[in-house]
Image (cartoon, rainbow, N blue to C red):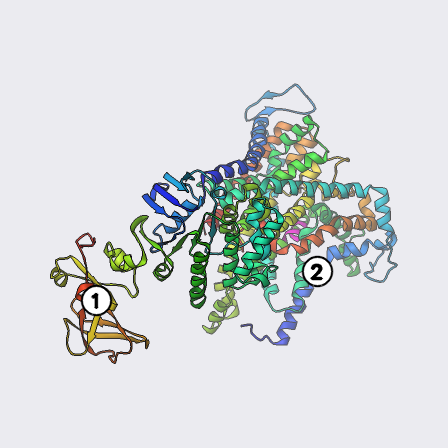
Amino acid sequence: MGRITLDKVTKKFGDVEVIPPLDLTINDGEFVVFVGPSGCGKSTLLRLIAGLEDVTDGEIRIDGKPATDLPPAKRGLAMVFQSYALYPHMSVRKNIAFPMKMAGMPEDEQKRRIENAARALNLTDYLDRRPGQLSGGQRQRVAIGRAIVREPAAFLFDEPLSNLDAALRVGMRMEISELHKKLDTTMIYVTHDQVEAMTMADKIVVLRAGNIEQVGSPLELYRNPRNTFVAGFIGSPKMNLIEGAEAKKHDAATIGVRPEHIDVSASEGAWKGRIGVAEHLGSDTFFHVHDTGLAETLTIRAGGEVDLHHGDTVFLTPQADKIHRFDGQGLRIS
Amino acid sequence: MARAVSTRRKAGYTIAAWIIGLAIFFPILWTIVTSFKTEAEAISSPPSFMFFQWTTENYSTVMERSNYFRHFWNSVVISLGSTVLGLIIAIPAAWSMAFVPAKHTKNVLMWMLSTKMLPPVGVLIPIYLIFRDVGLLDTKTGLVIVLTLINLPIIVWMLYTYFKEIPGEILEASRMDGASLRDEIIYVLTPMAVPGIASTLLLNVILAWNEAFWTLNLTAAKAAPLTAFIASYSSPEGLFYAKLSAASTMAIAPILILGWFSQKQLVRGLTFGAVK
Amino acid sequence: MATQHSRSAARIMISPAVLLLLAWMIVPLALTIYFSLLRYNLLMPGTERFVGFLNYRLFYENPAFWTAMLNTLLLVGGVLIVTVVGGILLAILLDQPIWGQGIVRILVIAPFFVMPTVSALVWKNMFMNPVSGLFAEFSKAVGLQPFDFLTHAPLASIIGIVSWQWLPFATLILLTAIQSLDSEQMEAAEMDGASPLSRFWYITLPHLSRAITVVILIQTIFLLSVFAEILVTTNGGPGVASTNLTYLVYARSLLNFDVGGGSAGGVVAIILANIVAIFLMRMIGKNLDA
């Protein structure tokens, strides 16, 4: 129903190549997240799939049928925009009905679907309001409602949560995940937030400068980052990357250790340093350790409460089986 | 934020502003007052401002005598016709420039404005001769054509600035929702731009209503709008102050009222966005 | 943000406007230039022939042309001085706290909406008429000889009438600009000990400079084409004392039927307007980038 294949898809703006030839398959029912720093081409890629931009070269197929030259309306996809893009002059009901009206669906069927969507999204009481009278989260739900009623082959989300405050974002994240479980429809989700990617995705596509750096499930990316870029991008706080003599010991140009894979001790360990900032959260404690001679700062995550403070000398020991090794090109050595 | 201003200072500013405001408005006020006088009172010396026998006979005389309504109707048709026609041509053009900007969009926009700077007298003769040859002299159609072209740059420009404020994502959303280009413009863009389109319409009706170069030069009796009708009062009827005032009041009243509603848009429309 | 579909649609949708304006500009312009090189009088049909720059030379040698040029510049310059200076003062006054500010604003703006023929006629007959105009009444009341404005100071009178029409425009735009001035900037200057006069000179005026330029340029474009006011009040007279370039071309071509001569005047008017337009377009263009 919603299998999307990109075959050597290329996009140029003038002479600037923003997406070099790119292959990707998105399977039916998958929740795929495109993640990467801003300007990496993730939104452009989404817009190419949506049909809002032309591909310069290559082919897009939806369910095996060529879609490269189809206008957006004919691709059977629905999109939720960053700004929600609701029609301000229409009530919530009319907003949700708009795609069905454009498709010329019978009135009673429209009504049924609007009511179903409103019930599922807790919008029943707001159907006659204008978007301007709704909160950010409600607007987001209207945008999703407008996408659902079309029963599209796939949903496209373009950074849909970036305009919400932190608390709402967590809630909406769960709602979208639940929606995916319920509908079992393909979803493509663009974000720059790796936490969203890790928590929601079946499959993460990490992009940099239009190139796919790695494709895989969240834990695959966490466990086996293919290069230093993915290693640094996935996981929070970021993986510590260490170069020089210490890396040489492991036959690598760079080694990486995640903050949660370093043990802390006040008395003994492999590395020695001094605590700069200590963040005591209760459930976790983060130390930013200086003067180790390995890197400017090493970030350490210790579980629970640890009674060490600014200025204390600490000893650090990386967990031997959790050390990632990278070569001179930044590629993983396995 | 606002600072407390002493009442005395405020009173001073208020008096000064009202005196100047009334002085500037006085010719209009005087015209309106005079239109309710008899001819004898209108030239009485010294003139009376309030205490005279108010009468509306001038209005009925003017309407009976000079086909006021025909000229009024001509003004309505010409100003509204040219503006609506201009909007129909300009809305798609402004859509193109605001939402599908190309490399040359800016240049096209500037060039359109530059046609507005062409002095009318520079093209009067050819237009006059062409109109004479094709029988458009002294017709409403002819004036609608000319005024449409004259105001088209302003209409395109104003719509462009209003459209620019509409987020492109909303139009893209409608495209994703299956709207054709026609649907997109009719159901999404136009309703969203209603305030902008309305103020564009208003300002251009005003400009067309008051246009007095082409309307005077290209009409005689048949298609003459109010500008030309009033000009015909030049002499000797101009000496009948009361009737002149009544005719003038009727000519400016509708536009004065529209104009007061469109003050804000005026700045935007007439400075081409250069002053905000 | 565009696809091939929308780009080609855009081209199609913009073309009516572009083609119409192109035709509107090129056809009459070309004909005007062409006519200006002909001997072409409507009273003598069939005698048209190419005369090169003769029309321009005749214009050049005609003292009326120089008077008209001078009058055009005086009219534009005079109205600009009155409206810009008056507009700045009025805008500053209206920006102060005032009871009934909205109403005063409306009163001040009103003249802009009065059609030129009406304002010319009202001023001519009801105010400037030497026998029964209001000004004459005042003169008589204070024991002075009534002054015949349109006979003895025709150009100054027209400058007065046109200034009355354009003062609202200048005021409105300058007021809009003043209101966009950050009040904290003013307060900072006050904290720094700047007097009201130096605040005006160092902060308000520089802030207004852009708006003032726009007012000057736009008004110039319109003022070069003042026509109805002259037609209704003085018919360019007495003699040519109040004839401007626009009126001269009108008189030449539509009253004397000298199409060739009139066209030559039209070309001169176009050149004059273009000099102003270049500056104006450059300003607007700069703003388009911002």
Q: Determine the chain carrying the residue at label 1.
A: A
Residue nearer the viewer, A120 or C236 = A120
Relative to A132, say whether C126 is above or below. above
| Picture residue at 84% right of the left edge, 57% below the top | B45
Q: Identify the secondary structure beneath mark 1.
A: loop
The magenta stretch is: C160-166
Q: Position of residue A319 (x, y in %)?
A: 19, 67
Kindly tell me whether residue A109 is visible in this rendering. Answer: yes
Kindly tell me whether residue A55 is visible in this rendering. Answer: no
For disc 1, the neighbor class at 10 Å (few under 14, some 14 to 19, many from 20) is: few
Q: Which mark is residue A296?
A: 1
Q: CA distance from mark 2 to mark 1?
A: 75 Å
Mark 2 vs mark 1: give the one in front.
1
Residue topped by disc 2? B23
For disc 2, the neighbor class at 10 Å (few under 14, some 14 to 19, many from 20) is: some
| Picture residue at 73% right of the left edge, 47% below the top | C118
Magenta residue check for C165? yes
Looking at numbered disc 1 in the image, what kind of residue is underneath it? Glu
Q: Position of residue C109 (x, y in %)?
A: 66, 56
